[in-house]
Image (cartoon, helix red, strand yellow):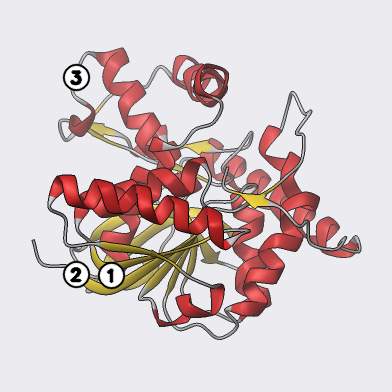
Amino acid sequence: MTPLVPSVGVFGAGAVGQAVGGALVAAGLCGRLLVTSRTIEQAQALADDLDDMRTALGSPVLPGAAEAEDLRACAAVVIAVRAQFANTRSTDVRMGGIQANAPVVRDLAEQLSGYPGTVLVVTNPVDLMTRWFAEESGCSRVFGIGSSLDSARYRLTLGRLLGVPADAVSGRVIGEHGDTSVVCASSTLVNDQSVPVPLQQVRDELDRRPGRINIGIGRTRCGPAGAVLSALRLALGAEDGTTELCAPHAGDWCGIPVRFTGGDPLPFSPPLDSVEDRQLEASRTKLRAAYQAARGVPLQPSPSGRKSP
């Protein structure tokens, strides 16, 4: 297989960083995979593990440990860092990381100021951290992967409820990657036909699924890695298509469809009924208020430890 780009970088050697690295090595997307973490020893350990995987698979991707500055030469970077903190929330769980993760994301934004490549943010709360990184760094190609993962879960869930394969379902989830996400049931198609969507059953499963994964294995990792790889293939021009990503649109940052043509992104408004339109406005309002509140609170010094979510 021929690598699509010379190099891709990953910030974070924890659960998600490991899964993203494994997906990139298996996919053969890049010639080099540069890994950074809170210590060079952690980055080197992950690079060594991925190098074993590369050899077993015969992958063209050469992993290596790097410093943050080295990633400026990459075609794309993935931010999968997580500060060390205890999240005690039982509701609005992803918002629990605002004050802990913001300083880490801010520091990375400063180090990558003006970076011209594609940035994919995984760190939660992903919609806020995506906007924070973009505004602090001045980078123009910054996206968050939350709604892409939500949309994949929606298609899988609806397919199971209706007894059809997930790839027969065309549907999306937009807005916040969190409690105010918007299921676009009115425009969902199954085998190119409109269908009644059992919305409450869908929402129940979408609400329960992340917690069930976290309880069972400690953290979601493979799903986010899949969303990252899918988005990278579009953003790097390997294929054209549309996915749901956190992106700037109509003055806000939230999950929205983004159409990629030759790697060029075009966010657009999806068709919504009146209920979905109100839900999206409520989601945008929540994210806007949370972001403004977070920016109004003085940031604490960046934690010494960081790991991926």
In this rendering, the answer to whether 308 lies above or below 153 is below
Q: Which residue is mark 3?
A: 164
- Looking at this view, is 127 or 214 the one in front? 214
Q: Residues within 10 Å of mark 3 (few under 14, many from 20)?
A: some
Mark 1 or 3 closer to N-term? 3
Q: Which residue is mark 1?
A: 236
Task: Tell me the quadrant of the picture where the C terminus can be found.
Answer: top right
- Mark 1, secondary structure of its residue: loop
Front position in the image: 110 or 203: 110
Q: Secondary structure at mark 3?
A: loop
Residue 4, disc: 2
The structure residue drawn at horizontal position 71% and vertical position 33%, both measured from the top left corner, is 92
User: Callout 2, which amino acid?
Assistant: Leu
Where does residue 75 sit, x and y in percent of width and height?
35, 76
Mark 1 → mark 3, Cα distance in angstroms? 31 Å
- Tell me the residue at 77%/28% (across/down): 89
Q: Is residue 41 visible?
A: yes
At which x and y percent is residue 215? 57, 18
**Distance CA(mark 1)–CA(mark 2):** 8 Å
Marks 3 and 2: which is nearer the front? Answer: 2
Image quarter (top left, top right, bottom left or bottom right) of the N terminus: bottom left
Which residue sits at x=37%, y=22%? 197
User: Looking at the image, is 260 positioned above or below residue 202?
Assistant: below
